[in-house]
Image: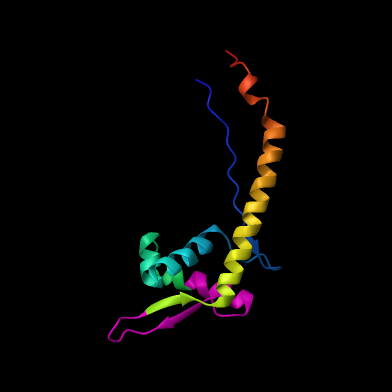
Amino acid sequence: MKKELHLKLTIRLFTDDNQRCFGPGIATLLERVREHRSLRAAAVSMEMAYSKAWRIIRTAEDVFGCKLLESTVGGQHGGGAVLTPEAERILAAYRDYQADVDQYARGKFDEAFGFFPELEKSE
């Protein structure tokens, strides 16, 4: 049985010294923070350690030179976190760029591998 080919792209941003600073993981983490209004809940939803989530956020904050989360501590209504305007802007730019690259790459993939369904399985 011949399998179907598909394309899976991931886009990761690196600093000039090759340090990974932004990609699909932190993008999803930020989206989950937006959804859950909590870094801890976002990390749990991704089966990620809270300490790792903070490390990822701090690395990106260091690279971009801005805060990505505004956090509040406990209290009567509990603590939480929301994305800063800068985080929203970075996340939107990343997702827009990702969509553009994905659309382009799918077209190139179809051009390059469009013949695949026509191949006969060699025995």
On the picture, is 9 further left or further right than 28?
A: right
User: Residue 23: horizontal and vertical position, in percent?
Assistant: 57, 60
On the picture, is 38 further left or further right than 18?
A: left
- Residue 71 visible in this rendered orientation of the protein: yes
Residue at far left of view: 76
Q: Which residues are magenta?
A: 55-79
> Looking at the picture, does residue 16 appear above or below residue 5?
below
Magenta span includes 69: yes
Residue at far bottom of view: 75
How many discs appear?
0
On the picture, is 33 further left or further right than 100?
A: left
Q: Quadrant of residue 24?
A: bottom right
Magenta span includes 2: no
Colour convention of the picture: rainbow
Taking the spot 64% from the left edge, 19% from the top edge, the residue there is 118
User: Residue 33: horizontal and vertical position, in percent?
Assistant: 44, 69
- Placement of the C terminus among the 4 image quadrants: top right
Camera-side residue: 89 or 1? Answer: 89
Camera-side residue: 27 or 22? Answer: 27
- Residue 21 visible in this rendered orientation of the protein: no
> Looking at the picture, does residue 91 appear above or below residue 10?
below
> Looking at the picture, does residue 77 appear above or below residue 102?
below
Camera-side residue: 18 or 121? Answer: 121
Taking the spot 65% from the left edge, 41% from the top edge, the residue there is 106
Taking the spot 51% from the left edge, 69% from the top edge, the residue there is 56
User: Residue 92: horizontal and vertical position, in percent?
Assistant: 59, 65
Taking the spot 35% from the left edge, 64% from the top edge, the residue there is 44
Q: Quadrant of residue 109?
A: top right
User: Residue 98: horizontal and vertical position, in percent?
Assistant: 63, 55
